[in-house]
Amino acid sequence: MTAIDIEALAARLDDAARHATATPQLEQAISLEQAYAIQRLSIERRLRRGERRIGIKMGFTSRAKMVQMGVSDMIWGRLTSSMLVDDGGAIGIGDYVHPRVEPEVAFLVGRPLAGAVTAPQALAAIDAVAPALEIIDSRYEDFRFSLTDVVADNSSSSGFVVGPWRSPATDLDNLGLVLDFDGRPQAFGSTAAILGHPLRSLVAAARVVAEAGESLQPGDIVLAGGATAACALRPGIHVSLEVASLGRCGFHVEG
């Protein structure tokens, strides 16, 4: 695939996300390296429009999901300022194609972090942790896509909500959580579903950004990965997440 092809695919996926219009699955077979190149170029278009890079999200952080998708490593995407939704705020259902939500844990980076690090080293670079919700949205028609399609589409990341920040010393091991719509539970889970412990996802985040020639900087947010299966959103509901020891966060979905 030539560079101009990659640019064209980046523009196509950026336009699909910006205008909330479904696009066909990518016709060409592309490598994972090319998929990340498309993702990077797509995000660069957003940055040129005035958005800011504010962190990354990790995906495929459950072993079962890796097996299902036939991969041996996680995927990741980039977070920008326009994707951040205020805790207690609202999103419009018409701004997405196939919106779903996943419960997460968020890390707030306090010191530069990149490369091969240990869990204690990763934790030492963190200023705070929080409950979080990620809004994922594949832009592909009929929700049909391959692994490389997903990666090119910014690993389906579209928005996120972060709850109150807590001390980084908060024990994240096996914290129970409940995701509900209008007070009705939709999913139950544990932070242990994120690679056995969310801190392992942070270690992986330091590695993958370094492989891309980047780093995590103070103020960046890292979403550790979904703790349950994603739940489809619909207009008129209030989405809420409660994580033991971390607290609550939520948002409204407007029609």
Image: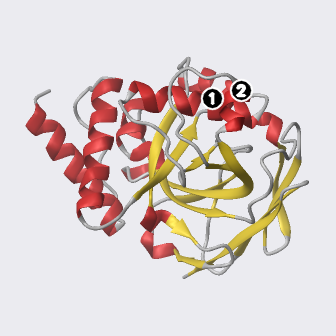
Which residue is at 37% across, 52% downward? 141
Residue beneath disc 2: 119
Q: What kind of element bears circle 1?
A: helix
Image coordinates for residue 63, horizontal then vertical, percent: 68, 24
Which residue is at 59% across, 28% downward? 204
- Check disc 1 and give the amino acid type: Val
Res. 25 mark:
none
Q: Quadrant of the N terminus?
A: top left
Image coordinates for residue 223, horizontal then vertical, percent: 61, 47
Visible residue check, residue 105: no
Residue beneath disc 1: 203
Q: How many marks?
A: 2
Are circles 1 and 2 on residues that touch, CB within 8 Å? yes
Is residue 174 or residue 52 the one in the foreground?
52
Image coordinates for residue 17, horizontal then vertical, percent: 35, 60
N-terminal of the pair, mark 1 or mark 2, is 2
- Check disc 2 and give the amino acid type: Ala
